[in-house]
Amino acid sequence: MQSHQSNRSDPHQQLRQLYRSLLESEERYHEFKQLLALYPTAVTETDEESEAEAVREQLNERIRTWVGGPFEGLSAMQVLLWRSIVVEERFNVTLAPWKEANGY
Amino acid sequence: MPDSLRIDALYGSFVARLPPELRSAGAELPFRLGLVPRPSITWSQAFKHAVTLQAPELLIDGTSGVDARLVDRAVLAHLLAVIEAFGADRVADGQVTASLELAAVLEQVRLARDEALFELYGEPAVELASDADRRTHQAIVSEQQRFGEDDPVPFSLYEAISSGKQAVGLTAGVALGKALGWRADRTELVRSTLMNIALGLQFQDDVVDWEADFVRGGAWALLLARHELDNASKPVDLAEARALVLSSGVLAELLMSSETAYRNARLGAEELGAVALAHWADEREREARDFHENERKTPGFLLRLKQLGPWAAEVFG
């Protein structure tokens, strides 16, 4: 029980739960993508307009529903990272994603 | 697995023999074909595994006393055949813009492939390649026709066209077997093993790329799905296409076919004594089984896995 509780309060574990929940549902994945697309790209670490904050809060609420429990919430920087990967499909080249893409 | 740096050395020897005005485009071909994000990335870095470009070498790793020069020619011919097919395919389906320079480089790739095949097994090897070129070309034309007609397609026809597309990737391995004096049944085993590897990869590709293919003008998954759903009518947009494809179960079916192809490749490689290749095919078979099971449970799984992969790698390592 104790380990279960600590897992649920571990932000890394929470992100894993989110990742799994997105992998498991097409509807969730598209809703997630749509909410990310609404998040403005002009946000910086220290400057998030209230409209952007509202989108992020809406996203975090939906995530709490999907993972079915406590979720610390994605920060502005985390939302921007997700957005760049999932919406804009801009990958960090150090990850060598082209290797994954070319199955030949 | 063999040292993949050898791939770059062999390809480098091809580039060095290009006319000076084509050398730059030749050296940057993975980038020019839109496969990698930087011009400095080489062919060995562009692919996930050595099998794609070095298959003939992997096929004979259980055979002792093989002339290294023959293996070199076979690997060079094979990698050039795959590169040329890859380039032609990307130009044909509009993933890269055709240019005179690109066409000239790809023509040089084909000529160098034939030269390597001639050195490997003489005129019969070049004839094998010409025949394979014809079959692959016919398959690509059939594919474009099907996409143009946009009618539902049964799985059997899709498999036949997919098999035709792989023909160019089988020649060098078969020619190497012939050059080594292998019996017809053994060279046939080489051919079927290579074919199963290529189909295993192709089926997965047609799952992972289906949305991008649809946007470009034709996706097998959609034509198969419409056939599966009693000749369902054409979708008006990607969202409708997605609903059809995901409800049809064809993505799981394609991944099951991929698993079967890898299993057959593993069995062929084991019979040939190609231990490293059998091990690779075994890993791919297990992976394909996992993909297939997850795709069946939650349609769209593999595409989501691909799209979320870079984020997962960044966060979870």
Image (tube, rainbow, N blue to C red):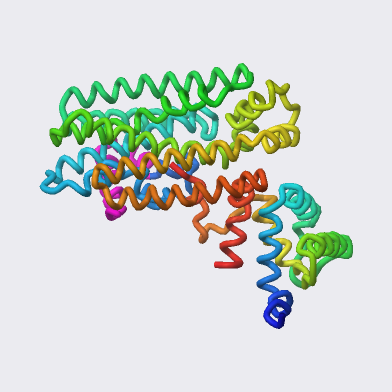
The quadrant of the image that shows the C terminus of chain B is: bottom right
Residue A82 at least partly seen: yes
Q: Percent x, y for residue A55?
A: 84, 59
Seen in the image, is B155 located left or right of residue B273? right
Q: Percent x, y for residue A22?
A: 70, 55
> For the magenta stretch, what is the residue range?
B1-27
- Please report the residue visible at 28 percent of the width from the left and 34 percent of the height from the top: B189
Does the stretch in magenta take in B58?
no
Residue B21 at least partly seen: no
Q: Percent x, y for residue A38?
A: 81, 53
Main SS of the magenta part reads helix
Q: Percent x, y for residue A96?
A: 49, 56
- Please report the residue visible at 69 percent of the width from the left and 76 percent of the height from the top: A7
The quadrant of the image that shows the N terminus of chain B is: bottom left
- Please report the residue visible at 67 percent of the width from the left and 53 percent of the height from the top: A86
- Please report the residue visible at 35 percent of the width from the left and 23 percent of the height from the top: B133
Does the stretch in magenta take in B10?
yes
Residue most extreme to the front: A1
Using the image, determine if residue B93 lies above or below residue B14.
above
Using the image, determine if residue B234 lies above or below residue B82.
above
Residue most extreme to the bottom: A2
